[in-house]
Image (cartoon, helix red, strand yellow):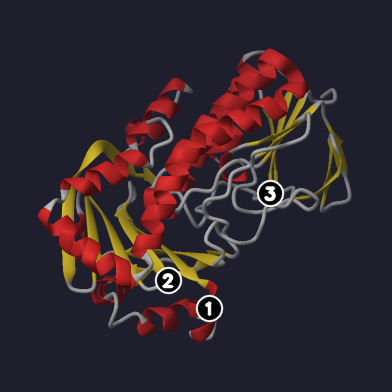
Amino acid sequence: MNTPEVLVIGGGPAGSVAAMRLAQAGTRTVLVEKNDESHDPVCGGFVSADALGLLRAAGIDAEALGGHPVNRMRFQLGSRRLEAELPFPAIGLSRRKLDAVLLQAARDAGVAVQFGRSARSLTDSRTVSFSDGSDIAADAIILATGKLNLRGIERPGESAHGSAKVGLRLALRPSTACVADLTGTIELHLFADGYAGLVLQEDGNLNLCLSVGTQRLRDAGGSPDRLLTALESEAPLLVQRVAAGMPLGGWSSIARIPYGWRATETRPGLFRVGDQAAVIASLAGDGIGIAVASAAAAANAFLKGGPAAAPAYQRAFARRARRPLACAELLRAIAESPSWSRPIARMLSIRPQVLAWGATATRIAA
């Protein structure tokens, strides 16, 4: 094909939605995805109401994909359990399923999708160099590489609170008792310098995502399994759920997650979307919402103003993401600190509706 007007790097929800929107408007668009097929990354198995609505606006009925309905949230702090109704409908849906559907929709819209090509660096303001030695130039670049950086335009490697985090994921075939207890529920386990989330997905598997400080993982010799053993006194139910399930493959991980970071500036022709635009704490469960919202905003900005619209788009989206990220960072700080989480847990046991407020305050569409 001719030189693309827009080159999209990354085939997750942010990249696919941006590419699809551009192609539908007649823009010559190429999307490059480093993997050969859709897969399950570390984060993103929970799809909240705002994300469902944003996907629907993009032409994707995610609820029709068979996601596990979620209507309750549960916080587990040691032996203490706090529960509340979610203030919105949500589903547990694997990224493998969601990403495959979105990429197919992008192809159907006319996007030229290329698999198995890994972007290495931005060689100049409009050209991307790939690991196979090739380059692609375009009028504009949409950076949708998730939590992975592209050389030359890296984000910071620390969270907003200055503590480097590691994200870990494990898929499990859950026990019958676990399925019964987690049906309709997203469960968060809190412990010092980290937390873990569990949710059932459309395939019946249990998705475990865990965020932990780098030092805690180092203290466990870098082994997620040893880390779980070390967490037995702090998160006994989490350890029991994992022990009772059957792992499906090994752990996947990503390091140096800068929770709370927002891209407030960019250069003309470079649009950052998804985690490259704003990194919300995973316990907020709105990563998909931010991905789709930023993708739609970036595509609309390009269609109205071309490559020169990138800086204004980035500043506007940073303002839009400021409140939900700030609320999520406050919740994360509380969750990871026993000195805060225990007294707050006692307060929430009296007024559990505050949990619903926290869930609403971290929504990008709120």
Q: Amino acid at mark 1?
A: Gln
Q: Nearer the viewer, residue 204 or 137?
A: 137
Image position of 41 with respect to 68: above or below: below
Q: Amino acid at mark 2?
A: Asp
Give how far apart the Cα atoms at labels 3 and 2 are.
Answer: 32 Å
Residue corresponding to mark 1: 215
> For the N terminus, which image quadrant?
top right
Image location of residue 247, percent across then percent down = 39, 70
Residue corresponding to mark 3: 34
Give how far apart the Cα atoms at labels 3 and 1 are.
Answer: 30 Å
Q: Amino acid at mark 3?
A: Lys
Report whether residue 222 is seen.
Answer: yes
Q: Residue at x 13, y 51 (%)?
A: 351
Q: Nearer the viewer, residue 338 or 213?
A: 338
Q: Nearer the viewer, residue 211 or 14?
A: 211
Image location of residue 231, percent across then percent down = 35, 80
Residue corresponding to mark 2: 193
Image location of residue 288, percent across then percent down = 46, 40
Whether residue 310 sits left or right of residue 288 in the image: it is: right
Q: Residues within 10 Å of mark 2 (few under 14, many from 20)?
A: many
